[in-house]
Amino acid sequence: LEPTLVLGGMDTRGSEEEWMRMQMPVSTSANGGGKKKKKKKNKKKDTAGGLREGSHTDAVMSLSWNTVHQQVLASGSADGTVKLWDCTHSTSGKKGDYIRPSATLTHHTDKVQSLAWHPSEGTLLATGGYDRRVCLADARSTDSQSVKTAKLLADCEAIAWDPHNQQYLTVASEDGVVQCWDVRKFGGDPVWSMIAHEYGGVSDMSYNAHVPG
């Protein structure tokens, strides 16, 4: 299978052909007497220019498609940034076409573990990270000062919007606690909180889209 889109990342064009050449058996000459050739020292692999411009510099830990602006994808990374990608706008480079981010958000100070677009407000993005914060960012602005923040007692592991009450943002953390905030009063006390798992963190969660409660 071939990808239809490339969003930043390492340029790996030609790597499969290089691997195949490495698997080819080395032929011995007729007068070589069966002697093995000396192995050459492994040279440092050429990254062919390294990362594409605008790429994350560490692992991508979370993705979220915008349900209102359906061509927009948000990505959260271990490099502490959130990037927004418009998948209809590609850039022509020396090594082929790829997508560059349309914006980079830097309001987190540690790995961005989870993010989720609001189901009906197309510019509202919720993010959570290992800096023990969950944030509400306006995608129209890259100013970190405009981001609203709520503090957690442990690292954020998962985020989910309540599809039946879209003002509610639910957050799961590494200490096994699940909390829900009303984003109209974000930053204060949560609407409710519960210990979902006593002996371990909550790694993920999901609302039933058909059954409220």
Image (cartoon, grey):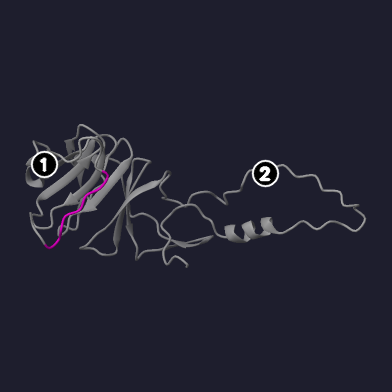
C-beta proximity under 8 Å, tags 1 and 2: no
Residue for badge 2: 43
Tell me what residue is drawn at x 47 percent, y 67 percent. 2
Find the distance from the CA under tag 1 to the CA under tag 2: 54 Å
Q: Which residues are magenta?
A: 203-210
Q: Which corner quadrant of the image does residue 149 belong to?
A: top left
Tell which circle, 1 or 2, labels the residue nearer the N-terminal end: 2
Q: Which corner quadrant of the image does residue 111 belong to?
A: top left
Q: Secondary structure at mark 1?
A: loop
Residue for badge 1: 186
Q: Position of residue 72 (x, y in %)?
A: 29, 60
Residue 38 falls within the magenta-colored stretch: no
Give the number of the disc on residue 158.
none
* In the foreground, 68 or 156: 156
36 over 121 or under it: above or below:
above
Q: Position of residue 196 (x, y in %)?
A: 17, 41
Residue 201 seen in the current view: yes
- Numbered marks: total: 2
Q: Position of residue 167 (x, y in %)?
A: 9, 51
* In the foreground, 108 or 157: 157
Q: Of all residues shown, which one is farthest toward the right?
A: 31
